[in-house]
Image (cartoon, rainbow, N blue to C red):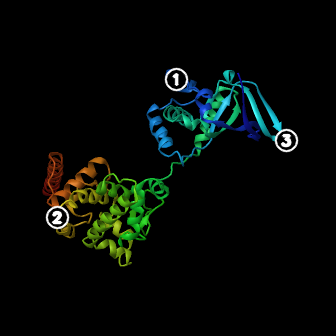
Amino acid sequence: MKVQFPAMKGMMGQRTYYACLMNLSSIPKMFTFQDWIEFRPEDREQRVLNRKRIPEIARYITENEDGYLFSSITASYQCEVKFKPVNGEDSLGMLEMDFEKANFVINDGQHRCAAIAQALDQHPELGDEAISVLLFPYETRDRVQQMFSDLNRFVAKTSKSLDILYDKRDPLSIVTLDVCEKVAAFEGMVEKDSVSLPVRSAKLFTLASLYDANKELLGDVQDDDATIQSMVFTAVDYWNEVSKYIPLWMKVKKGDLRALEFRQEFISSHAVVVRALGAVGGELIKLEDWRDRVKVLGEIDWSKKNRDWENVCIVANSVVSNRQARSATRAYLKHRLRLQLTDAESKSIAHAAATEAASMAAWEAADRRVS
């Protein structure tokens, strides 16, 4: 069966290729999936399709019908094609092929193709929309493997902070960005580009860590203006109150203490602690006396030398931010703020204390032997 697509003809890497427009309804018909899992990796022409990714991408399409966006699909065809120029233009015309013989290999975009097919099952009307497809002639298995490698070689995942900064659909992103501007201790002190702070950065926080902290503090935020404004008010109120009792944050902002020195000596701006502060805040703000309880934060020794942090969020003299450290830090702060602990949190505190006691006993025994 012959099919035609609007196309532009071009050259890249000394090879002729075509940039086509295909209706979404054509994608499931044109592109089928080879189950590569039975093949040795070196014999595959494409990576194995990760079916767990497909529902999320399909949901992105169906939930954002007025603004979803995809980059081009790239595929190799294995049939004869005929390019028919229009209006005397050598590079603009119609591409004709027998799609039953095309036997496409998707070089880049197989998860997009699978998600489009799933989205069409739910919303067939999307079939009239179009996506750009780059078509190259199939040469050899080695060539398509090289194409896959080349297409993915220089792809760099954007940082979580940058994703949050640019995401205008996520209500929690909107809340967090507003909070960064309205909380005095955060204003101008948040790294919005990278997920981690450069060694000599003058910032104290990352956008990613504040986003995670607000997620703990606020939970899911509904996407409507009234809810967003309410959540901004709650978060700003909470973080302003917290910053009163961690005055070193403002000391750094005012220039009385260098950010580098602060981060070297104290842990209160580290992601693991900021997230824990958000988590305890989620429980605190439900209590009438939460402002009084927050004052306890001013009594906590946030220095890295404080042995309380050993085996909580400091291991072998380094601050850690894995799941265990996050849970232990949250439990420690809940204990200090007189919040009810779960059994797991009580065990976490007991374990950290026991480990620290054993470590101290070992040091004392070693000192006695030296003496």
In-image side of 36 versus 94 (left or right): left
Q: Are marks 3 and 2 in contact (CB under 8 Å)?
A: no
Q: Residues within 10 Å of mark 3 (few under 14, many from 20)?
A: few
Residue on which disc 3 sits: 87
N-terminal of the pair, mark 3 or mark 2, is 3
Judging from the image, what secondary structure is the residue with disc 1 in? loop
CA distance separating discs 3 and 2: 75 Å
Relative image position of residue 102 (x, y in whole percent): 68, 24
Relative image position of residue 252 (x, y in whole percent): 36, 74
Rendered image quadrant of residue 78: top right
Q: What amino acid type should be assigned to the residue bearing mark 1?
A: Asp
Q: What amino acid type should be assigned to the residue bearing mark 3?
A: Asn
Residue on which disc 1 sits: 35
Relative image position of residue 181 (x, y in whole percent): 41, 69
N-terminal of the pair, mark 2 or mark 1, is 1
Q: What amino acid type should be assigned to the residue bearing mark 2?
A: Glu
Residue on which disc 2 sits: 288
